[in-house]
């Protein structure tokens, strides 16, 4: 009697094992992602988590800019393209899946009385035409301009929005990551800098003496980035040539699920609410 | 010497150790050259000194402002830290009561153990705003020199202390017997006798200052320009690599390896110069 039970239990167990394990393991193969160097670090992190869930899958990420992402996708050199901008009018043949939003805002020290800067004023400050705060309604003090190091996506987005070339910017301090920019601005009341909205908002809420300037009358909050009213922002897209299927579809579904929101926030991007 | 098997074994072990240490340096140099080659071939060596500026995204690759930045910040830090370190060691050896000397030595050792990123962080949040009040922007050559001097001070102070401690007792007794004052003993006997150790300490500290990355990255402002005053921001070769490596591709990435190669060349020159200067005079 006991033996029968045991046998039945064993049989159930083995059926159970057979029935369970293969499901996540069945996915096999390799995914090649190429394109924007802004999206690439995020795609690498997502790829690692996807590989951890599917041990037989390899996710290979290569950078080379959004244009490479589009070209490779069209010519079939990759499975998924990475593009850090909305698709252009002549790219409607491709399918885009936004996975996150990237927003950048100008920050000042909290004690700086200047509350708003127009687009032209920001351009003049960054190109060295305005060098004193009193010309934009602030105190009589020299402006310290903080710029980002070459290759950073925030720099790219900032320059693109204000139609600046990096070589035209007259910077006094060049910084690497967002936190260093926030420390520099919070340590000197006459500084102007720009950083990712997500990071700046978090630090301002936690007592760092900085303020986020609105752009075009829209407050710089991750909420406004998420609902796409904040102008200085862009979507980060995964693109495919045909409607995705198989492994590519699995990966895209994974990348737009809430399983990766923490990865998106770690890279100071804003997840898209669904 | 090789009559005993144990000696022979030891000899080969020592040879292997020396070969590994030497090979690592050569491998690093070879790797740097290999990674720099694409840039040197596409861009040409001339571009690294004649281009208008450093804007890799726009095809401009001038490294000279960063070379000057590295040299100036290092020279300033060594000029400041060397007298301070040596004199503090003199105080510790010849003037301080034993209790104070012991306590002081422990404190300097503690200073040597603080990681550079902590110095950099302190510089960024305290020193730079202070300098900024004096003369904006704040992150500057001066901030870099002060932070670096603080970082290499313990290296110089500790090696100088050890060197002064190694001066034979008999010399000092001789000086005492001649009726020399304490300062005359220090100046005329102890310092010349300890010259080689003092020199080694300064060279070690200079090497450390040249290679320091995180602290200078945080306090120097990182603007690519040749500084013309103490309050001008600058970028060093090391900071250039650390700032841009994560996002660099193609020729840009390769140009960063050229920065590293240049830094290695500077350190090589320093070592060679030290050898020439010291030959027959310090170590002889």
Image (cartoon, helix red, strand yellow):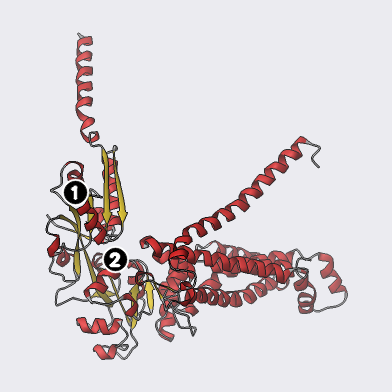
- Which residue is tagged 1? A252
* Label 1, label 2: how far apart the Cα atoms are: 22 Å
The mark that comes first in sequence, 1 or 2, is 2
Residue lying at 22% horizontally and 73% vertically, measured from the top left = A161
Name which quarter of the figure residue B190 lies in. Answer: bottom right
Name which quarter of the figure residue B233 lies in. Answer: bottom left
Q: Nearer the viewer, residue A243 or A169?
A: A243
Identify the element where label 1 is drawn.
helix
Residue lying at 47% horizontally and 70% vertically, measured from the top left = B216
In the picture, which quadrant includes the C terminus of chain B?
A: bottom right
Residue lying at 49% horizontally and 79% vertically, measured from the top left = B142
The answer to whether any part of residue B154 appears in the image is no
Report the chain holding disc 2. A
Identify the element where label 2 is drawn.
helix
- Which residue is tagged 2? A153
Q: Nearer the viewer, residue A36 or B123?
A: A36
């Amino acid at each position: 009697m006991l033996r029968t039970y045991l046998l039945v239990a064993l049989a159930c167990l083995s059926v159970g094992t057979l029935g369970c394990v293969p499901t996540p393991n069945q996915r096999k193969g390799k995914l090649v992602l190429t394109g924007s160097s802004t999206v690439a670090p995020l795609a690498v992190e997502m790829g690692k988590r996807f590989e951890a869930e599917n041990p037989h899958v390899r996710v290979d990420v290569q950078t080379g800019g959004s244009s490479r992402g589009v070209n490779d996708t069209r010519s079939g050199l990759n499975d998924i393209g990475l593009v850090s901008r909305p698709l252009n009018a002549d790219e409607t043949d491709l399918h885009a899946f936004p996975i996150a939003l990237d927003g950048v805002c100008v920050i000042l020290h909290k004690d700086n009385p200047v509350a708003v800067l127009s687009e032209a004023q920001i351009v003049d400050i960054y190109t060295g035409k305005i060098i004193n705060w009193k010309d934009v309604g602030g105190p009589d003090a020299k402006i310290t301009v903080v710029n980002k190091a070459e290759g950073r996506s925030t720099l790219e987005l900032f320059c693109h929005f204000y139609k600046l070339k990096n070589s035209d910017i007259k910077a006094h301090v060049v910084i690497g990551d967002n936190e260093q920019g926030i420390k520099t601005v919070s340590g000197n009341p006459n500084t102007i800098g720009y950083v990712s909205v997500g990071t700046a908002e978090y630090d301002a809420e936690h007592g760092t003496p900085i303020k986020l300037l609105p752009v075009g009358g829209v407050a710089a909050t991750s909420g406004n980035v998420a609902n796409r009213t904040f102008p200085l922002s862009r979507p980060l897209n995964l693109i495919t040539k045909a409607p995705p299927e198989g492994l590519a579809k699995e990966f895209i579904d994974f990348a737009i699920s809430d399983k990766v929101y923490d990865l998106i926030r770690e890279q100071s991007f804003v997840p898209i609410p669904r | 010497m090789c009559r005993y098997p144990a000696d022979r074994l030891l000899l080969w072990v020592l040879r292997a150790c020396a070969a590994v240490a030497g090979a690592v340096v050569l491998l690093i140099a070879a790797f740097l050259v290999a990674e720099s080659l694409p840039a040197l071939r596409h861009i040409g060596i001339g571009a690294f000194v004649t281009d208008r500026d450093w804007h890799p995204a726009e095809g401009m690759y001038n490294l000279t402002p960063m070379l000057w930045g590295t040299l100036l910040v290092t020279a300033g830090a060594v000029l400041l830290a060397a007298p301070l370190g040596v004199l503090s060691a003199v105080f510790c050896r010849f003037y301080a009561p034993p209790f104070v000397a012991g306590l002081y030595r422990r404190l300097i050792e503690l200073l040597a153990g603080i990681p550079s990123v902590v110095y950099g962080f302190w510089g960024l949040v305290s020193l730079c705003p202070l300098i900024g009040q004096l003369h904006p922007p704040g992150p500057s050559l001066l901030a870099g020199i002060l932070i670096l001097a603080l970082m290499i001070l313990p290296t110089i102070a500790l090696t100088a202390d050890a060197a002064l401690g190694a001066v034979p007792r008999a010399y000092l007794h001789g000086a005492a017997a001649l009726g020399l004052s304490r300062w005359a003993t220090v100046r005329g006997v102890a310092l010349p006798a300890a010259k080689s150790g003092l020199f080694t300490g300064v060279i070690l500290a200079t090497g450390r200052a040249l290679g320091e990355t995180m602290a200078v990255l945080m306090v120097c402002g990182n603007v690519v320009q040749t500084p013309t005053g103490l309050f001008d921001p600058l970028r060093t070769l090391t900071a250039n690599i650390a700032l841009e490596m994560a996002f660099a591709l193609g020729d840009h990435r390769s140009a960063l390896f050229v920065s590293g190669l240049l830094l290695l060349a500077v350190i090589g020159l320093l070592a060679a110069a030290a050898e020439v200067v010291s030959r027959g005079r310090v170590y002889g």
